Amino acid sequence: MSPGGPDWAIAPLSRHHDRAGFTCGDPALDRYLRELSGQDAKRNLASPFVLTRDSDPKVAGYYTLSAQVVELAALPPHAAHQLPGYPSVPATLLGRLAVALAHQKQGLGGVLLRDALQRAATVAEQVASYCVVVDALPPAVAFYGRLGFIQLPGRPDRLFLPMTIIRKTLT
């Protein structure tokens, strides 16, 4: 069974995916998918993944992953205390996550997030990553909080989820 049901698939963005009509309600996220995601992928700045129905190239949702560092001083004391005194730690940035308006409120945001966390955990077995970080838009902060993400002190829009918790959640 594919993510979101038997006829859904999540795959790396490719030329055959139809991005032209994508609209999620946030013009910046729409524009990114339509105009910039392919360029970011070619330049190795972000890896976009798209959700489509198996037989339809029209994008129903997407997310991006990229490398990031988090300053140790930015982490909450309980997390920073458990880490060596390096100035920063490696992380995976969940840069964008969006679901088309026609497919919202169907659980597909959670499907995309789970896939992103699974990919991040798999890659972290080869290239270290302490956590997944997200810079959430204000309406999405509660969504990430319900799923266990922790707000960074002084940055209510920046949340993180340690890889140890991700691995426990996925098993």
Image (cartoon, rainbow, N blue to C red):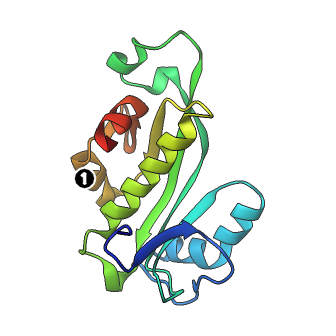
* Residue at image location 53% in from the left, 46% down from the top: 93
Q: Relative to 109, does residue 131 appear above or below in the rendering?
A: above
Crowd tier of the residue under label 1, counting other residues whose Cα lies within 10 Å: few below 14, some 14–19, many 20 or above: some
- Residue 167 at x, y percent in the picture: 37, 36
* Residue at image location 49% in from the left, 77% down from the top: 27
How many numbered discs, if any? Answer: 1
Q: Quadrant of residue 154?
A: top left
- Is 119 placed left or right of 141 in the picture? right
* Residue at image location 60% in from the left, 39% down from the top: 68
- Residue 104 at x, y percent in the picture: 30, 77
Q: Relative to 73, does residue 159 appear above or below in the rendering?
A: below
- Is 164 placed left or right of 36 in the picture? left
Q: What is the quadrant of the C terminus in the image?
A: top left
**Amino acid type at mark 1:** Ala
- Residue 84 at x, y percent in the picture: 52, 10
Depth check: give the residue in front, 42 or 78.
42
Depth check: give the residue in front, 27 or 171.
171
Q: Quadrant of residue 85?
A: top right
Q: Quadrant of residue 45?
A: bottom right
Q: What is the quadrant of the N terminus in the image?
A: bottom left
- Residue 32 at x, y percent in the picture: 59, 71
Depth check: give the residue in front, 43 or 159.
43
Q: Name the residue carrying label 1.
A: 142
Residue extending furthest toward the right: 43
Depth check: give the residue in front, 115 or 94.
115
> What SS does tag 1 mark?
helix
- Is 42 placed left or right of 149 in the picture? right
